[in-house]
Image (spheres, rainbow, N blue to C red):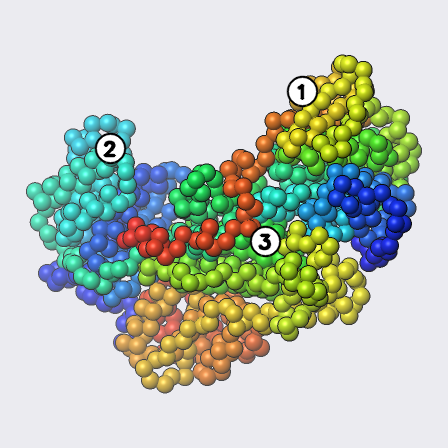
Amino acid sequence: MTYIAKPKFHHPALKKNALGFTHRDYEGKISTLCAGCGHDSITASIIEACYELSIEPHRVAKISGIGCSSKTPDYFLGNSHGFNSVHGRMPSVLTGANLANRDLIYLGVSGDGDSASIGFGQFAHSIRRGVNMTYIVENNGVYGLTKGQFSATADRGSRSKKGVLNTDNAIDLVAIALQLGATYVARSFSGDKTQLVPLIAGAIQHKGAAFIDVISPCVAFNNHAGSTKSFDYVREHNDAVNRLDVITGRDPITVDYAPGTVQVVEQHDGTKLALRKIDADYDAHDRVGAMAFLAKHAAKGQIVTGLLYVDPESEDLHSHLNTVDAPLNSLEAEDLCPGSATLDKINASLR
Amino acid sequence: MTPTDVAVQEQQTSARGQRVVNDFSIQVATVNGSGSQTANLVLLRSILLMGVPVSGKNMFPSNIAGLPTWYTIRASKDGYIGRKKEVDFLVAMNPETAKEDVLTLDAGAAVVYDEPLRLKELRNDLIFYPVPFDKLVAPVCPDAKLRRLVRNMIYDGILAKLLGIELPLMEKALGKQLGKKAKAVTLNTAALKAGWDYAEAHFTKQDPFWIERMSAAIGKILVEGNTAAAIGCMMAGVTVVAWYPITPSSSLADAFASYCKRLRHDPATGKAKYAIVQGEDELASIGIVIGASWNGARAFTATSGPGISLMTEFIGLSYFAEVPAVIMNVQRAGPSTGMPTRTQQCDIIACAYASHGDTKHVLLFPEDPAEAFEFAAQAFDLAERLQTTIFLMLDLDIGMNHRLCRPLRWDDARQYDRGKIMTAEMLEEGRDFGRYLDIDGDGIPYRTYPGTHPTKGSYFTRGTSRDRYARYSEEGPVYADNMQRLVRKFETAQDMVPRPLQANAAKPTKYGVIYFGSTAPAMDEAIGLLEEHGHLLDRMRVRAFPFHSSVASFIADHDFVYVVEQNRDSQLRSLIVNENGIDPVRLIPIVHYDGTPITARFIAKAIGDHQDHLKVTPLRKAVS
């Protein structure tokens, strides 16, 4: 958390997006995380993605749990409402907020302790319900604020900074998200902004549960030899299956790739996701194939990154519940209260 | 004659030959899952249709099928609808318990029983009506698979004939219960008739018990508190519900869903103007409620004790971050799993001070379904006005039993109180917005809904300490300033919540009694029993926490005040002592906590004993 607000002035020639906002309009307070923290890079990518998509900052609700990652919503989108809730419970708070007003964009920011350990259940159930959200896990495998204990995503056999060996099996949130029916699943690395920004932009445009696992080294407690979440380890073992470009209608990007190497996915709102294939065998429309691909590569010690699965026909919780188009929080008494005449009929049925 | 003897003596004698009209209780002993609930509700409703005040209490096990269950119906011409322990008329359908059921009856009681049980041999001071249920059910129900369910309706027919309930009224009650299921109506009507005909042909009325038409119950309704509370939520504009199944609260969420299905769909599109999520647990349920309320929707969850325990971390967040939430707590006997299908008022302290750190929460104590309806609707106004958690403290007795009460009323001119909301227009006008800034001196700040304004009014909601403008701060004075404002807010709440109701004895008295919630009908009746024997008491029914100042003055005005409640540790008394600095010696605990609803006779005896001896030592009376 920080109490230091960033200065508001900026260079008059600073580039503006379609709505006339500059990058500065998407920033928040100054980060109090450690210098070099992967989470700050993710914050920068979120700012970049929102800028590129020309989102009105106040139409975003940013919700988090507890931990280093959960502090970050204070560091971006200063004109958005934020909710730093309870440890591991971001998904339920976000679900409720989403039910109340389907018109806002919901950005859930969590960590590996928050989502894979204490909040594993809430992570799972919000995904299975198909809540329309962008769920980002800033995954460093350790508890930073309590000084370096393992979280549930730490790989078996990895060592903590104090030299303790992790003997528990790791939870791969991407594999679980695929299994639970997330309709947009990606993994990236905090140090790879080129890959991450479009993945976040695509997730925001996606209607349904979009999950992104971002490996984000902890410079204080998990960036040493023996860690499998360090900058060096991830760079060496990163196996990107594709590169994503998000093409919005108003800002056409010329796609010039060799035939057969680009998969184009059109989402509900008309935006197109152009996937430059790096691995020719990889099909981002195949959930079962993605799960098998992940497992195969994990066994070889490779960290598969990119857009791993997207369902262009996705639905969200509101479609499952068949709720009205207007946000529920905009309905007035005349929409909601059946009135005394109806109540009298209910009374009559109870006699 | 000691007061105890007086209290235990029946209001009417059941000596043979003397008619006992509209003032007795019927108990039906069956097996859980045998479909007897329909027959019992038809019997209950038919007595109501005769205009007789009536109530039903279901004593059921935590089991799906196979264990014993008892349903008790009390008809009371005087309108006493609290539980009465003594049974006047038994319907013994359960071979497992029949013997014991018969042996515990008072002399003069009547028994309708399944003939093969041969209960007649057990006692010679009872009136027996043996019925060959299997022989009677076969001709009316050719489908052998349905007979187990239909045979229960035969005892309704028998009872209608024996007690004088008009058969067409019972048929009407049956129609109401089964609705549009034509085949079921035909089958059960035939079973009713078969019972009636059998009783007419084979029995001579020997017992004194009669139901006769009267007008005392006309206009009243018979409803479970959970249903009434759910209707209150619907009227109050709830749009988001999240819940996790738990006895005895599940029927509240179910009732909300069923009324909304009928009344809350857009006629043009068929789409729902509400969202119900069955959470994966109680933590998620309260999280969803808090998220929805933060975002400007009215939301609630329904639960019971174990769920409250799980929710407490979030309840602290609601208190400290000042996010509205409504929790329907249908209390059951604790601690731990306790007795899930038995009633208690045992979560008073757990809810009043729920969560770590210094917290206090608003509790509402409805006495019956009608008040559960009113308080449920009011809970949302209070939650949004006070920006905090409001507990509606129901219990199994109110929630799951059919209670006679006044009809539910709604004033069409009523406006929802959405509390202090700063709108985009107000922000544009340049109003100073500090999320935790107390502008009006009542401890209640303004809030904005997410998405209100492009550049003004956003803030970061957090469970950590912050200043008046929602900026993170660990400064001691800033923290203390906020905590003091929360105290001010709680003081403001005192005058917003339902006030206690006081009724004084006919003559001045030095003694008073405080009670609340589902104890009310038994207390009303007990007051009469006590007065008959010269024990005069002023009474106060507490309806909410924080306590209104009149609670302290009521205690000050009396030498001793009894506090009657349904838990072991006299929790309301502890709360009163703690919050008002009362000398505990002046509050005499009267507690009943065996899981059955408290009775008038229990209260009258306990208070009578104390009055008789005028000892100041607390009475720790065991089960009634």
The quadrant in which residue A172 appears is top right
Circles 2 and 1 on the same chain: no
Circles 2 and 3 on the same chain: yes
Q: From the top left corner, tell me how far across and down residue A104 is, in percent.
A: 64, 45
Q: Quadrant of the C terminus of chain B?
A: bottom left
Q: Which chain is indicated by disc 3?
A: B
Relative depth, front residue between A249 and A221: A249
The quadrant in which residue B3 appears is bottom left
Instruction: Give the residue type that dot 3 points to.
Output: Gly
Q: Are marks 1 and 3 in contact (CB under 8 Å)?
A: no
Residue at the spot x=54%, y=71% of the render? B494
Q: From the top left corner, tell me how far across and down residue B347 is, in percent.
A: 52, 59
Instruction: Name the residue tied to disc 3.
Output: B296
Instruction: Give the residue type that dot 1 points to.
Output: Asp
Q: Secondary structure at mark 1?
A: loop
Mark found first going from the N terminus, 2 or 3? 2
